[in-house]
Amino acid sequence: MTIDNTPPVVNILAPQDGQTFTFHLGEPIQVNVSASDDLVLQRVEFYVDGKLVSTLTDPPYLLLWDEIVGMHTLMVEAFDLAGNESHASVSVVVNK
């Protein structure tokens, strides 16, 4: 039996850390993520300011986020079947 101690790999491709957006009603920000595991990736979770907003089990790992004016932390966590996890985060600013 193989023991899986290797966590998944997860990266936020967009937006970039420190990126600034201008609020446009009806035009969500796309959060694009790459995630993989050496065996089986179970899920990717998306968080905005610490609150879980979406869970995806299949690629593409994409969140269309209806932004709110202000500074925000976007975080993603990837989990494999063995319970290993990894995360990535960026901070973004949304202006009026």
Image (tube, rainbow, N blue to C red):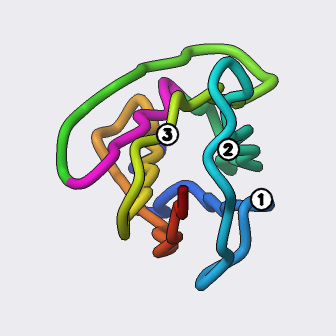
Question: Along the line of sight, which residue is nearer the eye, 81 or 19?
Answer: 19
Which of the 4 image quadrants contains residue 65?
Answer: top right
Query: x%, y% of residue 54?
Result: 41, 21
Query: x%, y% of residue 27?
Result: 74, 27
Q: Residue furthest front?
A: 96
Disc 3 packing (10 Å; few <14; some 14–19; many ≥20): many
Query: How many numbered marks have been drawn onto this rendered protein structure?
Result: 3
Disc 1 packing (10 Å; few <14; some 14–19; many ≥20): some
Question: Along the line of sight, which residue is nearer the eye, 20 or 37?
Answer: 20
- In the image, 84: left or right of 14? left
- Label number found at residue 27: none
The residue wearing badge 2 is 31
Q: In this picture, is 84 found above or below 70?
A: above
Kind of residue indicated by mark 3: Glu
Residue visible at 69% across and 50% down? 38
- In the image, 41: left or right of 74? right
Q: In this picture, is 56 found above or below 47?
A: above
> Which element type, helix, strand or loop, lies under badge 1?
strand
Quadrant placement of the C terminus? bottom right
Q: Earlier in the sequence, mark 1 or mark 3?
A: 1
The residue wearing badge 1 is 14
Which of the 4 image quadrants contains residue 11?
Answer: bottom right
Q: Kindly report the distance in space between the C-alpha atoms of the residues bearing marks 3 and 2.
A: 11 Å
Q: Kindly report the distance in space between the C-alpha atoms of the residues bearing marks 1 and 2.
A: 5 Å
Residue visible at 58% across and 32% down? 41
Kind of residue indicated by mark 2: Val
The residue wearing badge 3 is 67
Disc 2 packing (10 Å; few <14; some 14–19; many ≥20): some
Q: Earlier in the sequence, mark 1 or mark 2?
A: 1
Q: In this picture, is 88 found above or below 50?
A: below
Q: Which residues are magenta?
A: 42-49
